[in-house]
Image (cartoon, rainbow, N blue to C red):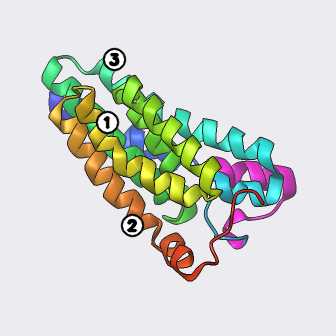
Amino acid sequence: MGILIIAVVVILSYIIGSIPTGYLIVKAKTGQDIREIGSGSTGATNVKRVLGKKWFFTVMFLDALKGAIPVTLAQVFAHDAVYTGLSAVLAAVAVLIGHSKSVFLKFKGGKSVASGVGTILALNWIAGLCVALIWSIITYTTKYVSVGSIIAVTLSPVLMWIFNAPLPYIVYCALGAVYIIYLHRSNISRLIAGNENKVRE
């Protein structure tokens, strides 16, 4: 029964993670396909290029919610402590994959930062708030969303450790950071070349 619950959790988390928030909002507001604009990502930063700051924060919030809800539900409905931790971590992994490889967009998507922060908030809200704060400070200071994202997710396993989170949560954050940094490889190339787009001038 526990394995069945976990399987359902993973599938539902992937589907929720796959909901292409940025794509749907841009499509509804402008009729455009965001995958054909800017970086081609469905995330909040690319949405800002089309719809401005208001929708940047809206998409970011919705994507974070998309990450937090499946993990929270996994924690609520798992029937014992072992399955609670396992279900929560697998739900978080499924959300990250769903956001970046959406079944609704032929396995394309965003870079899973906001959704990833949402999962961390659900796993350990103090660590999650710290990650969000670090992202905000670095992004504001450097003017690069990618730099803020990379630094924040890199520090997430350290923050989980500092706040005495279970080992599976620390491992998830470490592996999630590697995955998100991999998704930012084009941003890293542009940063090195000096032509990465700034979030504000």
Choose top left, top right, bottom left or bottom right for residue 70: top left
Quick one: 153 or 73, which is closer to the camera? 153
How many residues crowd mark 3 within 10 Å: few (<14), some (14–19), many (20+)? few
Residue contact between numbered discs 2 and 3, judged by CB atoms under 8 Å: no
Quick one: 110 or 94, which is closer to the camera? 110
The answer to if 172 sits in the magenta stretch is no
Q: Which residue is mark 1?
A: 159
- Left-right relation of 39 to 97: right
x and y, in percent, of residue 128 in the image: 42, 32
The CA span between labels 1 and 2 is: 21 Å
Disc 2 secondary structure class:
helix
The CA span between labels 1 and 3 is: 24 Å
Looking at marks 1 and 3 on the same chain, the residue that comes earlier in the sequence is marked by 3
- What's the mark number on residue 182? 2
Looking at marks 2 and 3 on the same chain, the residue that comes earlier in the sequence is marked by 3
Range of residues picked out in magenta: 20-36
Disc 1 secondary structure class:
helix
Q: Main secondary structure of the magenta part?
A: helix
How many residues crowd mark 1 within 10 Å: few (<14), some (14–19), many (20+)? many
Q: Amino acid at mark 2?
A: Tyr
Disc 3 secondary structure class:
helix
Which quadrant is the C terminus positioned in? bottom right
Q: Which residue is mark 3?
A: 76
Q: Which residue is rendered at x = 20% and y = 33% of the image? A: 86
